[in-house]
């Protein structure tokens, strides 16, 4: 399986990082070794002094798809979860300045904790989902999928032009505003609507 991630999909987050608003989805990948499941702790990597949390809705792909049309994209999403796109912001800033790929800042081991997945049939409207992140019980990030620049359908369609989607692939769909550094001892909890989706510690 593969993990595909979308950057710059919430306007207020684009502003906080002083990035340009994209005209097409910004796409990057993470390898399978980035995944943490079942609330496994996140270990701070030794190469960064500024690792940021980015809470994101994660889509799970339910069947193979290539050149998927937007109108049919929902048929390829079988479940929804919540994850964190951990980002070594100091490394990413250096790479961005040089115009180099972000991989080591975004795709390192453990950089993609994900929750359990809930079937799409559990949700009335995927385009109106509230989600949030607390750090040590304090609200840090809060978003709704109606604030996305590119909808889930547009993301699935766009991504499938370049990468064949396969059963079990995961797509991180972008983070709302409020990203900030984590430190050892922090406890991160993610909520989708009112449901606690993950609860893990930073070490
Ligand atoms: Mg992100």
Image (spheres, rainbow, N blue to C red):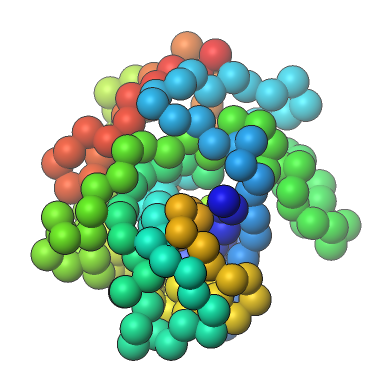
Residue 151 x/y as whole percent:
37, 74
> What is the tally of numbered marks visible in this picture?
0
Side of 151 relative to 171 (left or right): left
Residue located 31% across and 45% down the image: 117
- The picture places residue 1, in percent across and down from the top left corner, at 57, 51
Instruction: Please tell me which residue lies in front, 98 or 172.
Output: 172
Camera sees residue 16: no
* Image spot of residue 15 (x, y percent): 52, 62
Relative to 26, residue 28 above or below: above
Residue 90 image-quadrant placement: top right
Residue found at x 48% / y 19%: 41
Query: In the image, 200: left or right of 157?
Result: left
Above or below: residue 166 compared with residue 156: above
Is residue 44 visible in the rendered image? The answer is yes
Q: Residue at x 54, y 14 (%)?
A: 203
Corner quadrant of residue 149: bottom left
Examine the rendered structure and indicate whether residue 154 appears above or below residue 103.
below
At 61% from the left edge and 37% from the top edge, which residue is drawn?
Answer: 34
């Amino acid at each position: 399986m593969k993990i595909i991630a979308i950057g710059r999909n919430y306007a207020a987050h684009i502003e906080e990082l002083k990035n340009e608003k994209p005209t097409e989805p910004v796409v990057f990948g993470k390898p399978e070794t980035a995944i943490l499941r079942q609330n496994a702790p996140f270990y701070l990597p030794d190469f960064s002094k500024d690792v940021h949390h980015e809470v994101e809705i994660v889509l799970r792909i339910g069947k193979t798809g290539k050149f998927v049309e937007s109108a049919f994209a929902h048929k390829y999403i079988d479940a929804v979860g919540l994850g964190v796109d951990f980002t070594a912001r100091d490394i990413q800033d250096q790479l961005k300045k040089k115009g180099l790929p972000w991989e080591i800042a975004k795709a390192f081991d453990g950089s993609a904790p994900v929750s359990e997945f809930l079937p799409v049939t559990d949700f009335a409207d995927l385009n109106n989902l509230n989600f949030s992140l607390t750090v040590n019980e304090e609200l840090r990030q809060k978003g709704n999928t109606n604030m996305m620049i590119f909808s889930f359908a547009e993301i699935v369609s766009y991504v499938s032009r370049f990468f064949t989607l396969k059963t079990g692939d995961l797509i991180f769909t972008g983070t709302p505003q409020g990203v900030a550094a984590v430190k050892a001892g922090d406890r991160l909890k993610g909520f989708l609507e009112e449901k606690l989706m993950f609860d893990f510690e930073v070490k």
